[in-house]
Amino acid sequence: MVYLWGLGTQNCSNIFAVLSHADPCMVVYPPCMSEADRFSLEALRTIHQKIDDDQDGEIEVEESKEFIIEDMKQQQTNKHSNLHREDQHITVEELWRGWKSSEVHNWTQDDVLRWLKEFVELPQYEKNFKDFKVNGNTLPRIAANEPSFLSGQLRVQDQRDKQKLNIKALDVVLFGPPTRPPHNYMKDLLLIVSVVMGIGGCWFAQAQNKASKIHVSRMIKDLESLQRAEQSLLDLQEQLERAQEEKRNVAEEKQNLEEKMRDEIMGAQEEAHRLHRLRQGAVSELSRLRFAEEELEMQLNKSCTRFLSTLQQWLQLTHEVEVQYYNVKRHGAELQLTTAKEEAERIKKKRSSVLGTLHVAHSSSLDQVDQKILEAKNALSEVTACLRERLHRWSQMERLCGFPIIRNPGLANLTAKLYTEPVALPLPRVLQPPFSCHSSIHGSIEDLLEDPTSPILPQMPDCRQAFHCELSC
């Protein structure tokens, strides 16, 4: 549309009439100012068709009430007054004007995220909304329940979540921002009391469990000591019975057997004392080994910490070096786009005269400009794909390692930390272009990835169509 201003009033009027029949955005007021407005208008047309049961192009009051009760599953039928007000028949253009002047249309990204968490109660999709930069102008697409938009771009796969998002979005798009329900302080008090009781019960159960374990361990030790004493008593009883039997059989050996028994008893006592000393030594050795194990574990943790810190710095340095090479490639693509723009400006200057227009129409310069624009588009697509792959790869590495890599103190600080002596890294230099095109002025390739509706790539084919349109006029 920028190139059509210099073609004359009559020619531009004819072109505007042709575009009005082909583009629905040109027949409404206010007209669509961006690609997001175009998507919003198409979504509002879809919503208008859903409510308009008789398909006469207008929404009546009865149709609004029926839609609220049956499709939105709400009993507040007085909501239709917010939509109709004094107009009993609403067309698509009136619905569009009402949407453009509504408060929800001007919602920022933070307002939409607050609505998603507090009123829709689906905070698990907050990251998806942030990645797509959903604002108030995007809500009609959710209200229209576009499958490709919800499943493909916002990555909402659960059908119940889709239905909930659809109903809540219809509510704010058609009837304005939601009202906050009164806060239930009694519910909060009951929740706090329940949490305190639960924590107290867990603490009491843990204390009882710990005490019971200590008591059971003591009982097991006492039982083992009792079993050893019982076994010793049984041995002594057997020996005493044998001695008594021998005493009955051989009277003359009585004294010898008694002395022998005394010696054996003394030996048993000495053995018991020796075993007791061995047990105390084993306990001391076990304590020493435990202390040594704790010291070894502390040293191992310190070594692991130093290793992970060094590994993080090297990975951050690798990431920064890769960013430098990527910037060279990105600036090369921007230079190609700048060259294509310069060629387009030259053709525009030639077209200012009649002979220049004929010369441009019969020369191959227009095809060359098309070729340069296509090459610039391919270069930007390649840079975009390279950036996506790099971001995905480093994000996976951050998730696996458990520490930040992309956010780092910078190449100079990392080089000073990792190299004890000054080292000149052979990094590529980024050549700054003399001037940049619209896409390089307002954002980098990273902004292109964050904003899927960025005008860098979609506007390239429109430039070639504008050249052909100028020549035909």
Image (spheres, helix red, strand yellow):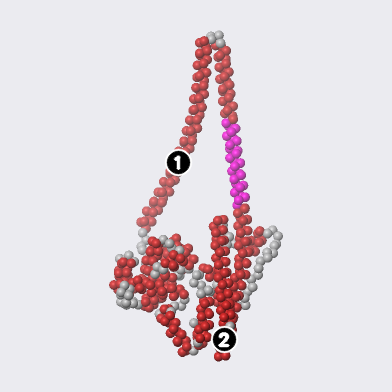
Q: Residue at x 47, y 33 (%)?
A: 219
**Closer mark to the observer between disc 1 and disc 2:** 2
Q: Residues within 10 Å of mark 2 (few under 14, many from 20)?
A: few
Q: Position of residue 343 (x, y in %)?
A: 59, 81
**What amino acid is at disc 2?**
His
* Residue 312 visible at all: yes
Q: Position of residue 134 (x, y in %)?
A: 46, 68
Along the viewing direction, whichever of 356 and 438 lies nearer the viewer: 356
- The overriding secondary structure of the stretch rendered in magenta is helix
Q: Quadrant of residue 400?
A: bottom right
**In the image, is residue 284 part of the stretch drawn in magenta?**
yes
Along the viewing direction, whichever of 103 and 311 lies nearer the viewer: 311
**What amino acid is at disc 1?**
Asn
Q: Position of residue 200 (x, y in %)?
A: 42, 47
Q: Is residue 256 above or below residue 304?
A: above
Find disc 2 in the rendering and name its residue: 362
Q: Residues within 10 Å of mark 1 (few under 14, many from 20)?
A: few
Q: Residue at x 57, y 56 (%)?
A: 401
Between marks 1 and 2, how big is the CA–CA gap? 94 Å
- State the mark number for residue 268: none
**Mark 1 vs 2, N-terminal side:** 1
Find disc 1 in the rendering and name its residue: 209
**In the image, is residue 20 part of the stretch drawn in magenta?**
no
Total labels drawn:
2
Q: Residue at x 59, y 73 (%)?
A: 333
- Could you say whether the residue bearing mark 1 is in a helix, strand or loop? helix
Magenta-tinted stretch = 279-305
